[in-house]
Image (cartoon, rainbow, N blue to C red):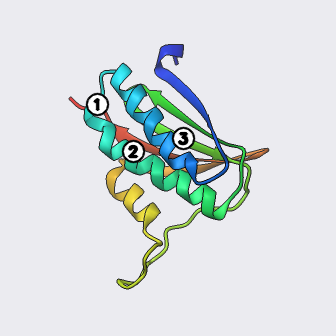
């Protein structure tokens, strides 16, 4: 993949990470001429990064890959498998991966020697 189609960002291992991830997404998608994917991609990275902050551990980093689709990857050092929860209607949380699944073409997890990568794929606009 050409260097211009890959953007990598380190993120703090604290609650500021989601806001920084959204800012990086807005800036990078604008550079790539894909501002229409901004809101959906910001939602995806907010949920993925938020899950790392709540349930895993850093170091935390994010990558965006532009090819035949847009892939968002979030890396952490935890070997824990993320799973979709079935939140009750009165629960205030627990819907993050449901949202990611709803707005993504596909999503999944890749395990690495030093942790994992949670990724989401979105189609590019026509």
Mark 1 = which residue? 35
Position in image of residue 54 (x %, y %):
61, 63
Q: Is residue 22 left or right of residue 102?
A: right
Of callouts 1 and 3, the N-terminal one: 1
Q: Above or below — where is 89 with respect to 71?
A: below
Mark 2 = which residue? 42
Of callouts 2 and 3, the N-terminal one: 2
> CA–CA distance between discs 1 and 3?
18 Å
**At x 46% / y 51%, what residue is drawn?**
46
Mark 3 = which residue? 73
- In the rendered image, the quadrant that contains the C terminus is top left
- Please identify the residue farthest to the right as the structure is shown: 113
Q: Above or below — where is 84 with respect to 65?
A: below
**At x 30% / y 21%, what residue is drawn?**
33
Position in image of residue 42 (x %, y %):
39, 44
Q: Can the viewer see residue 2?
A: no
The number of numbered badges drawn on the structure is 3
> CA–CA distance between discs 2 and 3?
12 Å
Residue 89 found in image quarter: bottom left
Position in image of residue 85 (x %, y %):
49, 73
**From the viewer's perspective, is the residue at label 2 or at label 3 nearer?**
2
Q: Are marks 2 and 1 in contact (CB under 8 Å)?
A: no
The residue carrying pointer 1 sits among few (fewer than 14), some (14 to 19) or many (20 or more) residues within 10 Å by Cα, namely some
Residue 78 found in image quarter: bottom right
Of callouts 2 and 1, the N-terminal one: 1
**From the viewer's perspective, is the residue at label 1 or at label 3 nearer?**
1
Q: Are marks 2 and 3 in contact (CB under 8 Å)?
A: no
SS label for mark 1: helix
> CA–CA distance between discs 2 and 1?
11 Å
The residue carrying pointer 3 sits among few (fewer than 14), some (14 to 19) or many (20 or more) residues within 10 Å by Cα, namely many
The residue carrying pointer 2 sits among few (fewer than 14), some (14 to 19) or many (20 or more) residues within 10 Å by Cα, namely many
**At x 37% / y 20%, what residue is drawn?**
31
């Amino acid at each position: 993949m050409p260097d211009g189609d890959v953007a990598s960002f380190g993120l703090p291992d604290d609650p500021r990470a989601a806001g920084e991830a959204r800012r990086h997404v807005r800036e990078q998608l604008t550079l790539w001429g894909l501002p229409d994917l901004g809101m959906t991609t910001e939602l995806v990275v907010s949920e993925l990064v938020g899950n790392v902050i709540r349930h895993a551990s850093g170091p935390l980093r994010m990558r965006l890959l532009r090819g035949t689709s847009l892939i968002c990857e979030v890396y952490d050092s935890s070997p824990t498998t993320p799973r979709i929860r079935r939140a009750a209607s009165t629960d205030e949380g627990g819907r993050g991966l449901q949202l990611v699944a709803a707005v993504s073409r596909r999503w999944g997890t890749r395990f690495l020697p030093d942790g994992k990568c949670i990724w989401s794929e979105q189609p590019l606009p026509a």
